[in-house]
Image: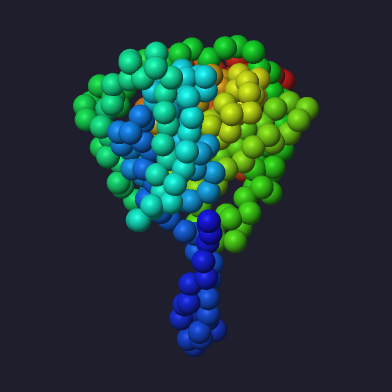
Amino acid sequence: MSVDVKAATLAWRDGRFAASERPVPEEAAVAVSINGTTHAVMMATPSDLEDMALGLALNERIVRTIDDVEWLEMESVDGGYDCRLWLVPQRAATYVARRRQMTGPVGCGLCGVESLEYATVSLPKARDTLAVEPAQISQAMEEMAEGQVLGRRTRAVHAAAFHRQGMGCIVIREDVGRHNALDKVTGHLAASGAEPSLGFLTITSRLSVELVQKAAMMGCGLIAAISVPSALALREADMAGITVVAVARGEAFEIFTHPQLSLIHI
């Protein structure tokens, strides 16, 4: 499946118009179905969709572990893609669909929830198992930038990545939606058996509350972002014991919550 196309443009440069072209990212409707029932429909970059579906199921507590998924299949359908998860009987019996219709422009993390109660969830506490040197934050942001193949080509997508000490960047995923990119990382880590508490996340976007919630559900105790976090994201991170690093550009960054838990030599 193609993730970008060439778009014809009329470019104004040097005081005159000229025919040109520019790569732009593909964006497709992606349905995530649970045991035959549509759970969510999102606009996403059509790549690593199995990772995204699994990550969404984990981050929204539809499944607790990958073992709750009996099988996962992805099919190209009229109008987009359908990612179908079938749960083991024990988990299927407890599944209550929240009937989210996330048909916003880029898969907004809370768009379309049925009730306000779903916007504020009880988050697990991050485990204090990680110690990160300041230089590792800068290195991780650089690794993420280097891995943004689609981002460099189009300048129009977000990226999320996971890093382990001594191993560097384990996985990077790109998407038109920042929430989708992080779900893709979650799904990859679960499928590969990696332990999120032993590393940390980086993301290209601002840090909204939904991204903090996803990090907490993953069990990841540190997330670093390029832009400034929201106040609600900081309150949620503080309660969940997550270290928020933001405005991470070059060798500079700012720590907003729990510096004592994850960063050393401060």
Task: Decide which of 188, 179 is in the foreground and name it.
Answer: 188
Tell me residue 59's x, y (percent).
44, 26
Q: Quadrant of residue 124?
A: top left
Which of these two is toward me, 119 or 51?
A: 51
Eyeballing the image, is 176 above or below 26?
A: above
Residue 236: x %, y % from top left: 41, 21
* Pick the front one: 87 or 117: 87
Residue under the image location 53 percent in, 30 percent down: 186
Res. 182 visible in picture: no
Task: From the top left corner, tell me how far across and down residue 237 is, in percent.
Answer: 46, 22
Q: Position of residue 48 (x, y in %)?
A: 54, 44
Q: Quadrant of residue 222?
A: top right
Residue lying at 62% horizontally and 41% vertically, measured from the top left? 172
Decide if residue 140 is in sight here: yes
Q: Is residue 10 left or right of residue 114?
A: right
Q: Residue at x 60, y 37 (%)?
A: 161
**Quadrant holding the C terminus:** top right
Q: How many marks?
A: 0
Q: Residue furthest right?
A: 166
Q: Is residue 99 shown left or right of residue 51?
A: left
| Residue 236 in the figure: left or right of residue 136 | left
Residue at 58% across, 55% down: 150
Furthest residue to the left? 115
Where 28 sits versus 18, above or below? above
